[in-house]
């Protein structure tokens, strides 16, 4: 059996994926060859419209198109016309990224090109591993580079050069790769034929965890720890795994808060003196001791956003904050992804958004065998945890959840294809 030949649409999609995962290359080529949003993604959309127009109204794309027409095309300019400029721009970019990533997966599933999807996923994981290496190198020169990449406009000239030439991953990239942890565990723990050896995958997993810790984004570190523990559980019996998770949760809530406070303070002593991570651990320790949003810890300042957003939601529960004209700014609440959406959209818009995501993710889970599905649900859980604690932006998380990880499910096909040739 001959290997499927790559065509122009596959090359376009490859460049779309590479421009999102291989920053050491795409930050250092001329600007007109580097952009995902204005070059590779539009070309991919245009080619797929020409060769497979029905993909736009197939499966999850159908739900996404209806969502776009109603939410982005109509309600955004009528019901939610008072949305702040910052939130509005994020809504548009998020929908654009959702369309591109969902369409890529829908196309390959529709034409049953699973081998190509697996191969693209293999390259994407390789590019991710390269970016993990270059990020670690960059962090030796500036330990807060990833943290501060959330606002690159505030980079010093030295940070800007380091960020460009090293290809260090961005703040949103650092979030997205947490979703990769369960799938790496899946291939490490099972005897499935795969694209990389177990030794390479173990090295990638260890490097990923180390990089998250060195990046000093506390929420990412916390979610990485939780997802790593859950992924390491045995899945021979999913019911048994559920019981174990519930037991861990019970133990977690049963431990006195003073124990956690002492634990975080002790951990802070293991970090570099004066580092952001040391500050966050000590700060969180103080907040656990005194969980009052009126105290002066950084954690309490971040905690203030929760009652602010929730009170706003209660004031406009059905149509959201964006449906009323006011001089009050809610942009500070954007640091909490899901709660911010609930506040600005209200129940009506928020449930529509959740329904759209649910339909897309549900259609993806139906591709998988039960064992792999369990780990994919952990990847989704990582996204939910992150979105509950921080802002989730960029295209990376959608690329990993909608394209790369589904493609990883078909990795055994790569070896099968090689053996038949």
Image: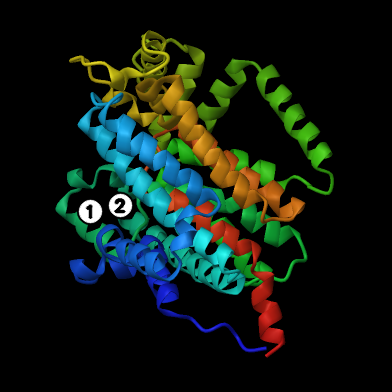
Question: Which corner quadrant of the image does residue 329 belong to?
Answer: top left
Look at the picture and state if 320 lies above or below 135. Answer: above
Question: Which corner quadrant of the image does residue 257 belong to?
Answer: top right
Question: Which corner quadrant of the image does residue 93 belong to?
Answer: top left
Residue 57 pos. (x, y %): 48, 53
Look at the picture and state if 340 lies above or below 205. Answer: above
Residue 30 pos. (x, y %): 19, 71
N-term mark: 2 or 1:
2
Q: Residue at x 75, y 52 (%)?
A: 371
Identify the mark at residue 224; answer none if there is no mark.
none
Mark 2 or 1: the one toward you:
1
Q: Residue at x 26, y 31 (%)?
A: 77
Label 2 sits on residue: 142
Please say whether residue 179 is visible from this viewpoint: yes
Look at the picture and state if 343 lies above or below 6. Answer: above
Q: Nearer the viewer, residue 258 or 203?
A: 203
**Placement of the C terminus among the 4 image quadrants:** bottom right
> Circle 2: is it few (<14), some (14-19), or many (20+) Cα within 10 Å?
some
> Circle 1: is it few (<14), some (14-19), or many (20+) Cα within 10 Å?
some
Residue 86 pos. (x, y %): 24, 34
Q: Do labels 2 and 1 touch, CB within 8 Å?
A: yes
Is label 2 in a helix, a strand or a loop? Answer: loop
Identify the mark at residue 159; answer none if there is no mark.
1
- 296 relative position to 388: left or right: left
Look at the picture and state if 181 lies above or below 129. Answer: above
Residue 193 pos. (x, y %): 72, 71
């Amino acid at each position: 059996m001959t290997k499927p030949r790559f065509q122009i649409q596959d090359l376009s999609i490859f460049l779309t994926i590479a421009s999102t995962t291989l920053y050491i290359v795409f930050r250092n080529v001329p600007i007109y060859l580097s952009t995902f949003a204005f070059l590779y993604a539009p070309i991919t959309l245009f080619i797929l419209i020409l060769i497979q127009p029905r993909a736009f109204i197939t499966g999850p794309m159908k739900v996404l198109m209806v969502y776009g027409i109603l939410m982005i095309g109509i309600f955004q300019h009528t019901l939610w016309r008072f949305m702040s400029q910052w939130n509005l721009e994020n809504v548009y970019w998020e929908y654009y990224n959702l369309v591109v990533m969902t369409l890529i997966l829908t196309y390959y599933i529709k034409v049953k090109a699973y081998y190509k999807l697996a191969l693209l996923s293999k390259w994407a994981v390789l590019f991710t591993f390269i970016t993990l290496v270059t990020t670690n190198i960059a962090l030796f020169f500036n330990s807060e580079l990833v943290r501060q990449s959330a606002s690159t406009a505030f980079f010093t000239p030295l940070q800007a050069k380091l960020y460009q030439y090293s290809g260090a991953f961005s703040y949103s990239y650092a979030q997205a790769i947490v979703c990769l942890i369960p799938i790496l565990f899946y291939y490490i723990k099972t005897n499935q034929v795969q694209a990389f050896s177990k030794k390479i995958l173990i090295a990638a997993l260890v490097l990923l965890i180390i990089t998250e810790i060195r990046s000093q984004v506390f929420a990412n570190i916390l979610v990485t720890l939780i997802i790593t523990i859950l992924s390491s559980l045995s899945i021979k019996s999913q019911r048994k795994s559920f019981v174990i998770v519930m037991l861990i949760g019970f133990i977690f809530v049963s431990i006195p808060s003073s124990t956690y406070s002492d634990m975080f303070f002790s951990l802070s002593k293991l970090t570099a003196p004066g580092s952001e991570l040391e500050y966050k651990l000590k700060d969180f320790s103080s907040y656990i001791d005194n969980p009052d949003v009126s105290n002066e810890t950084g954690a309490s300042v971040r905690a203030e956003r929760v009652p602010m957003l929730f009170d706003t939601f209660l004031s406009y529960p059905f149509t959201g904050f964006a449906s009323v004209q006011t001089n009050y700014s809610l942009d500070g609440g954007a640091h909490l992804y899901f709660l911010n959406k609930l506040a600005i959209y209200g129940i009506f818009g928020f449930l529509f958004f959740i329904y759209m995501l649910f339909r897309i993710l549900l259609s993806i889970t139906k591709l998988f065998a039960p064992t792999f599905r369990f780990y994919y649900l952990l990847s989704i859980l990582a996204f939910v945890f992150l979105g509950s604690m921080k802002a989730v932006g960029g295209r990376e998380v959608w690329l990993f959840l909608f394209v790369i990880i589904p493609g990883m499910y078909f990795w055994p096909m790569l070896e099968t294809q090689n053996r038949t040739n």
